[in-house]
Image (cartoon, rainbow, N blue to C red):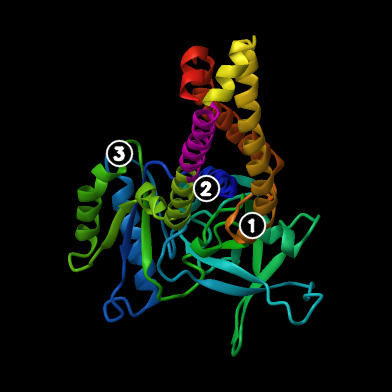
């Protein structure tokens, strides 16, 4: 009973994690990572120019719908960049609170390529260059933390780092929450998207391409497009977004499979054990059953006798299992997603299932008892 309930909770949790809203459309996306040489691209303007030329080439490829560049793709396993942020005119209520956001530096078409949902304002565009007003697009969670209940469009926010002063950035758009952080996949973290041309950095860049068909078929063409811009530029980690997402829930998938396998084994042992106990009981009571039949007991009376004994065993086991499960499942709180460790529906469904299977296990030896010949049964005695 305990294994079945734990397995049921883990399986439901994994199912919910599989269908969590990512905040973007992962279909038909291809990612290519590029580490730009510090000697060849020592000036940030050179990095911007390289990115612009690569995007210009890739966007003209047949079968490419759009393309963009970011410093981190969603849910990647490599180093993800975060930033401490400050909202203009709103110091944290508690000085010990350090508001942190996922820090993404992107080109104008990246958010459209990723397929995010624009809630308010606008996305980044080609006008967001170094010579213009610093701007930022933020996620709904960052808007909630920074300006709860207010319109954040036109408000200002900036990055905070000891020994450095960063410019205030004006919020021009709010997008839906995007699952950017692999290690905080279960929650919505604040995210902001800063124009690549306005935030100097030396991070590796990720070229993200949205294809009109199978993105893997664009691999060779994208490689060649990068090579035409810089023949010496190495590329790595070429994969589809779907392939990247396949490894996100590997731990949860293993836990769900393991618990389901243990639960199935427990169910099998319970049914076999119950069948064995009742069958042994029928064998031991063969003479008694024969005598009852000889004195006028009907098959239904024999069925009630055997099933009643089996039902008592089943209900006793279910009751004990429920008490243990009620205590045990509380240790699964950190492993469950969107589900209470004492979920009533799971407890009820498992109770019903185990009771039905227990009764079925009792019915088989009961059916044998119903067919006993009273003469042979009395001789056996």
For residue 343, which quarter of the picture? Answer: top right
- Give above or below for 111 relative to 271: below
Q: Within the magenta stretch, is there residue 136?
A: no
Q: Nearer the viewer, mark 1 or mark 2?
A: 1
Q: Within the magenta stretch, is there residue 278?
A: yes
For the residue labelled by badge 3, is the local secondary structure a helix, a strand or a loop? loop
Taking 65 as reference, is 170 left or right? right
Q: Residues within 10 Å of mark 2 (few under 14, many from 20)?
A: many
Work out whether residue 321 or residue 46 is closer to the camera in this orientation and state it.
321
Q: Residues within 10 Å of mark 1 (few under 14, many from 20)?
A: some
Magenta stretch: give its range. Answer: 266-285
Quadrant of the image for the N terminus? top right
The image position of residue 32, as x and y in percent, is 31, 58
Tag 3 residue: 214
Residue 366 can be seen in this image = yes
Q: Residues within 10 Å of mark 3 (few under 14, many from 20)?
A: some
Residue placed furthest toward the bottom: 163
The image position of residue 43, as x and y in percent, is 36, 78
Checking the image for residue 328, the label placed there is 1
For the residue labelled by badge 2, is the local secondary structure a helix, a strand or a loop? helix
Among numbered discs 3 and 2, the one appearing first in the sequence? 2
User: Residue at the location (50% across, 25% down)?
Assistant: 381
User: Residue at the location (62% across, 17% down)?
Assistant: 292
Taking 69 as reference, is 183 left or right? right
Checking the image for residue 14, the label placed there is 2
User: Residue at the location (77% across, 61% down)?
Assistant: 147
Kindly check if marks 1 and 2 are in contact, taking CB atoms under 8 A apart as contact. Answer: no
Taking 336 as reference, is 254 left or right? left
The image position of residue 326, as x and y in percent, is 69, 52
Q: CA distance from mark 3 to mark 1?
A: 46 Å
- Give above or below for 275 relative to 3: above
Checking the image for residue 368, the label placed there is none
């Amino acid at each position: 009973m305990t294994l079945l309930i734990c397995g049921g909770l883990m399986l439901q949790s994994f199912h919910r994690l599989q269908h969590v809203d990512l905040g973007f459309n992962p279909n038909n996306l291809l990612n290519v990572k590029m580490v730009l040489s510090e000697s060849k691209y020592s000036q940030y303007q050179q990095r911007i120019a390289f990115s612009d030329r690569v995007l210009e080439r890739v966007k003209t490829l047949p079968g490419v719908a759009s393309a963009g560049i970011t410093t981190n793709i969603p849910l990647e396993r490599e180093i993800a960049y975060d930033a401490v942020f400050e909202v203009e005119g709103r110091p944290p209520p508690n000085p010990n609170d350090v508001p942190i956001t996922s820090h993404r530096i992107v080109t104008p078409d990246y958010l459209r390529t990723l397929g995010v949902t624009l809630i308010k304002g606008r996305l980044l565009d080609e006008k967001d260059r170094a010579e213009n007003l610093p701007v930022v697009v933020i996620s709904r969670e960052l808007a909630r933390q920074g300006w709860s209940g207010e319109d954040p469009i036109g408000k200002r926010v900036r990055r905070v780092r000891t020994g450095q002063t960063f410019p205030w950035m004006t919020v021009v758009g709010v997008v839906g929450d995007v699952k950017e952080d692999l290690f905080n996949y279960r929650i919505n973290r604040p995210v902001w998207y800063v124009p690549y041309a306005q935030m100097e950095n030396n991070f590796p860049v990720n070229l993200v391409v949205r294809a009109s068909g199978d993105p893997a078929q664009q691999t060779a063409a994208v490689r060649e497009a990068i090579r035409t811009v810089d023949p010496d530029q190495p590329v790595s980690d070429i994969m589809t977004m779907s392939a990247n997402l396949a490894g996100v829930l590997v731990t949860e998938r293993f836990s769900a499979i393991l618990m389901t396998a243990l639960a199935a084994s427990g169910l099998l042992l319970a049914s076999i054990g119950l069948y064995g106990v009742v069958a042994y009981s029928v064998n031991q009571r063969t003479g008694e059953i024969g005598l009852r039949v000889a004195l006028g007991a009907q098959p239904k009376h024999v069925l009630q006798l055997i099933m009643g004994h089996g039902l008592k065993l089943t209900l006793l086991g279910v009751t004990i299992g429920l008490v243990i499960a009620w205590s045990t499942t509380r240790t699964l709180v950190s492993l469950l997603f969107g589900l209470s460790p004492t979920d009533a529906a799971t407890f009820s469904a498992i109770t019903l299932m185990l009771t039905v299977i227990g009764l079925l296990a009792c019915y088989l030896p009961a059916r044998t008892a119903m067919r006993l010949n009273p003469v042979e049964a009395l001789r056996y005695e």
